[in-house]
Every structure is written in structure tokens, then in C-alpha cells.
Image (spheres, grey):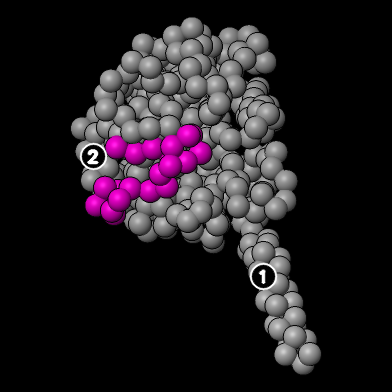
Amino acid sequence: MVKYVRLVIIIAGILLVLALIPAAFLFWISANEYRPASREPVSVIKSPPLLPLAGTPIELYSWNIGYASLDMSQDFFMDGGRGVRPATGRNVEENIWAIQAFLSTSAPDIVFLQEVDVNSKRSYGVDQAGYFSETWKGSSAFACNFKVKFIPYPVPHFIGGVESGILTLSNYAVLQAERISLPTSFEWPVRAAQLKRCLLVERVPLQTEGDDPAQLVLVNVHLDAYDSDGEGREAQTRVLREFLEAEYSKGNYCVAGGDFNQNFPGAEERYPLIHTEYFIPGTLDPAQFGEGWIFAADPSSPSCRLLNEPYDGNREGKQFYLIDGFIVSPNVEVLSVQTIDLDFKNSDHNPVKLTFLLK
């Protein structure tokens, strides 16, 4: 009888410990949740003296680099694949070198990068933001939007710790940089392990002969992807719209660009949904903005691919999207917009080039 009681006590103790482990983890991850303020200043590194001049063409590239890990050899578990990260850190390094070489050769005036890791297990701890900042001759500003000490899925290949964000590189003097938090549709406890989306705003003074206080307002954007009903993306787009319209009303020139995780108008006809069981982007609605606002994207090539399987270059039956592009204010003239078709060699996104001038 005594042995039986002891066995019951031992089993009960084991069950209690097993029950407490998830509770302890939830407490720990909640206590360490990344909670940025609604607005935070962002440090600008190496701001050069060059100022943009109205009427002079400016080249801007936007590229979601997939934390230099989602190259053509990869799939991803949240897109219907099974992968979490490349086989080795060498994959990450080679992708970073290729991305940097492309930017160096292209030599744009401004670059918006999304999914840039600082210290993440998924990219083998490589400081990508630091690397791009060091190799860029002009200024750099980084805003964190994903900071979790440990993500316990998928089993058994956990994502682990993540620190990542969006990075803006510029050849122009930056008056001020700021991180503006965006709303989230995720509730606790899922929220604790989710991205904290934001706008990375840079204010660039213009080269003028008078006392014109107008600024070029650059907004690096990466909106929600996996909110099931799209409410997060819609709410974040509203905040972006309100911010841009407020800046335009002050007489500023506004250029927002990045990965909107929403198709630009006309994309569905060119890239129809094939795999509706996976990621489904929303669609940006220009009618929500005032008259004269321009939605600039190039449908001639896809800007993003679905990561349900590795990519071999054969586009037959593959799912593509047009979710990367720009929204610009009426006082900005778009000269051209082009999706640079790199065939997803080093990222699941292609870079998009915008050439514009300030009227």
C-alpha cells in the first residue's frame, strides 16, 4: 500500500511539473515581450551632407531580403513548406554578399530593406543590419520589428531567438529618423511571439534657395502577412494613410515603399491565386487615399513567390504575388517603376526600383 501511494505521488508530481512547464514558459515569454513605444527616435549612422533637389531624378530600391535565408533553394513552414532556415550559415553569408553586390553595382540614392536580421537563430546569428550599414557609403537607420527571445515552433526545429527589422540606407542628409508603431490584430499569448510592425520614417531636408521648410519624407514599410482575416494589414494601412496625408498637408513630399503583403491593383489578373490554402494577400485600394496619390508597382515581373517549395526557375504552376511597391504623394512625379527580375535567387522577393522627382 505504501509503495502504491508513493507511486501515485510520484506520478502526480510528474504530471504537475509537466503542467507547470507551459505555464512557466508563458509567464517567461510574456515578461520578456518586446513592447516598443508608439513613437521612438531612431539613430542615424553616417549622415552625409548631400541634399536632394526638386526636379532632379532620384532612384530608390525596395527589397525584402528574406533575412538572407529564403533563397531559391528554400521553402518555409508557414507557406506550406517544411523549412525554417538554410542548412548552414554559409548559405546566409553567400546571400548577403550577393545582395550587397547588387546594391553596390546598382548604386541607388536610397534603399529600403525589409526582413534584415541582427541576431537570429534562423540566420545563424549574422548581423545583417551591421553589414549593410558598414558597406553602404551613406547613412543607415534601423528599426526593430521582431524581437523574441525564443519561439517554440515548429516542432522539432524551433525558430528560436529572433531580432530583426527594417533598414533604410540613403545618400542624403537625414534630419530625423523615427520608429512609429503599427497596430496588431494578434492577442496574447500569440502576440508575445509575433512581429511588432512599424513604419521607419526618415525626414530629409531639401536643397532650396529660399526658406521652404518642405521635406522629403521617406517611409520604409513591412505590413502583416499571416493575420488570418486581414484586419491587421487593413488597420496598419489606415495608419500609414493617415500619416502620409498629414505630412502631405504640411507641404512635404512623401514616398512610402516596401513589402505591403497586399497586392497592388491589377495584380490578381496577372498573378491569380493558385494555392488558396496558404498565404493570401489582401489588395490595396487607391480609393482610400485622396486624389492624385500614386500606387507604383510593376506587374511585368512578380515581386514575391510562395515558399511552399524550393524554386527551380520553372514558373509553371507556381504562385507569385505583386506585393512590393510604392505609394507616393501627388507632388511627387513617378518617372518609372520596375521590378528587377533576379528570379528569386537570393530572396523570396525581387527588388523594386522607383525613379521619381519632386515637383
Residue type, label 2: Ala
Secondary structure at numbered mark 1: helix
Q: Which percent across, then down, holds residue 2? A: 77, 92
Please say whether residue 80 is one of the residues in the magenta stretch: yes
Taking depth in this image into account, of 224 and 36 the one nearest to the observer is 224
Distance from Cα at disc 1 to Cα at disc 2: 46 Å
Q: Which percent across, then down, holds residue 254? A: 53, 25
Q: Which percent across, then down, holds residue 248? A: 61, 23
Is residue 91 something one can see in this rendering? yes
Q: Magenta segment range?
A: 73-92
**Residue at the image point whose x is 65% and y is 28% from the top:** 230
**Residue at the image point whose x is 53% and y is 29% from the top:** 278
Residue tagged 1 = 18
Pick out the residue farthest to the front: 1
Q: Which mark is residue 253?
A: none
**Residue 151 to residue 170: above or below:** below
Residue type, label 1: Leu
Taking depth in this image into account, of 345 and 155 the one nearest to the observer is 155
**Residue 131 to residue 7: above or below:** above
**In the figure, is residue 174 to the left or right of 343?**
right
Residue tagged 2 = 98
**Residue at the image point whose x is 28% and y is 53% from the top:** 88
